[in-house]
Image (cartoon, rainbow, N blue to C red):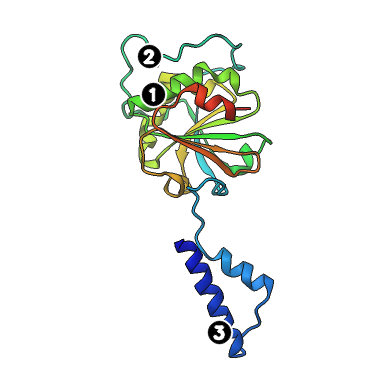
Amino acid sequence: MFRYLLTVLMLASLGCAAQHGQLAITPTRIEEAKKTLEIDYKVIGAPMPELRLLRFRDTTQKEVPAPEPAPVAEKKGRKGKRPVIKKSDAAGMDRKFLTSKDFDNGANLIIMMFNPTCSHCEDETELLEKNIFLFTKSKLILMANPMMQEYIPNFARSFNVTQYRTITLGVDSGDFITKTFIYGALPQINIYSRDRKLLRTFSGETSIDSLKNYIE
């Protein structure tokens, strides 16, 4: 409603200016006025904001294809003692900046915003890794806040996610999280269509049954 009122007011101002001979109302000017309004990237159907990611990849790990499909229990949590994710240096880590173009492969894109020290995020990461065979075309991005950059190398080594070509691990370097995070539970998973429109948002731990209909 608020966005609608802003649009009406802006178009009204154009009409007032036209009456005083300052400009002529044209379809182009109307579209330009609409574009000046800030896009709400959190609503379903919104375009995906431009992506800029500082990717981390463990160079000591060999890239492997996705494992063959196998029955996976929905139970979450790692066996044995959970690794403690602490700050760690980036030795042995290959870092590279990626943009939206690097993920343009004609399939849905799944972006999980997470905290590497969050136990729920760790469980969700493990669940996705176990079901990585579902990602035949879609790509999965694990994106952390830039303040968490020091924790990423340790997280990468603990979960071995960078060995899969369909998973990209990194930190936001372009305000993506600021524009899309709905301030609910972590992790937050955003699903984008092939033309990069928001299809669905999940907050908190999410079952694979809820996600697999969006994975290609």
- Along the line of sight, the residue nearer the viewer: 86 or 78: 78
The residue beneath circle 1 is 122
Residue 20: x, y in percent? 58, 90
Label 2 crowd bin: few (<14), some (14–19), many (20+), radius 10 Å: few
Q: Are marks 3 and 1 in contact (CB under 8 Å)?
A: no
- Along the line of sight, the residue nearer the viewer: 161 or 200: 200
Number of the front mark, 3 or 2: 3
- Helix, strand, or loop for circle 2? loop
For marks 1 and 2, give the CA distance. 9 Å
The residue beneath circle 3 is 16
Report whether 125 appears left or right of 86. right
Residue 110: x, y in percent? 54, 33
Q: Is residue 63 visible?
A: no
- Residue found at x 54% / y 77%: 12
The residue beneath circle 2 is 78
Number of the front mark, 3 or 1: 3
Give the residue furthest to the bottom: 20
For marks 3 and 1, give the CA distance. 56 Å
- Along the line of sight, the residue nearer the viewer: 100 or 15: 15
- Helix, strand, or loop for circle 1? helix
Q: Are marks 1 and 2 in contact (CB under 8 Å)?
A: yes
- In which quadrant of the rendered view does residue 103 lie? top right
Q: Give the amino acid at mark 2.
A: Arg
For marks 3 and 2, give the CA distance. 64 Å
- Helix, strand, or loop for circle 3? helix
Residue 37: x, y in percent? 51, 64
